[in-house]
Image (tube, rainbow, N blue to C red):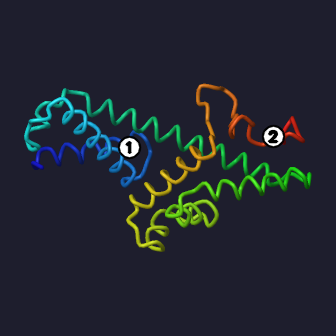
Amino acid sequence: MSRTLLDRLRGRIVRVQCQCGISFEEATDVVYESLAACLCCLRAKHPDEPADSLLTHLEPGFLDAVIRKRVADRYRRQRCEQRAIAECTKALTVCDPEQRAFTLLLADEIWDALPENCREVVYLRIYEQCSWDEIAQATGLGVSAAKMRFQRGIEQAWKNLGVTCDESSSSNDFSIGSIPAGETACTPGGC
């Protein structure tokens, strides 16, 4: 990579970090993921082009548009995760023994839906509330790899369980299969 390109990427990383209020590592991940996505698009359009000249076909503003979309997607996923965690926490405080038992069964089902290689990272992040640096140190992964493993694990668990998070809805409703989270056949109103 040329020095000019690296300087421009560093500038974008700092701009994303400042504008979005995210850490330098997260901003770096977003910019590099966006660049990789752009390169994949360019490779599809120009399959015979040598790798070192592929970026000459990058249209002005395209990388920035991809970065904005990835930041928005990251923010939306984080909001979904935070709402899901809040919903589960709320469900765990229910005094009704039947509802509490259902919630614990659901937690087991979610744990089982997580891929094996993601469980340690998810456990450390959610239950132990470790920072990404602490998780990286405990697992021997890099910070970016730990974040990626966490994100992919959560997404796979949601997919395995049929969980949906409707961002277009103004409510905080989650669905697990066809049952809204917090509801059972025994308690139609949920919590």
Q: On residue 183, which mark appears?
A: 2
Return the x and y of residue 115 as percentages of the image width and height: 53, 58
Label 1, on which residue? 18
Residue in the picture at 79% in, 52% down: 103
Return the x and y of residue 183 as percentages of the image width and height: 81, 40
Name the secondary structure under disc 2: loop
Q: Mark 1 vs mark 2: which is more N-terminal?
A: 1
Mark 2 residue crowding within 10 angstroms, few (<14) / some (14–19) / many (20+): some
Front one among 105 and 136: 105
Q: Quadrant of the C terminus?
A: top right
User: Could you tell me the amino acid type at mark 1?
Assistant: Cys
Residue in the picture at 70% in, 34% down: 173
User: Could you tell me the amino acid type at mark 2?
Assistant: Glu
| Residue 45 picture quarter | top left
Front one among 67 and 174: 174
Q: Is residue 145 above or below residue 87?
A: below
Return the x and y of residue 164 as percentages of the image width and height: 62, 36
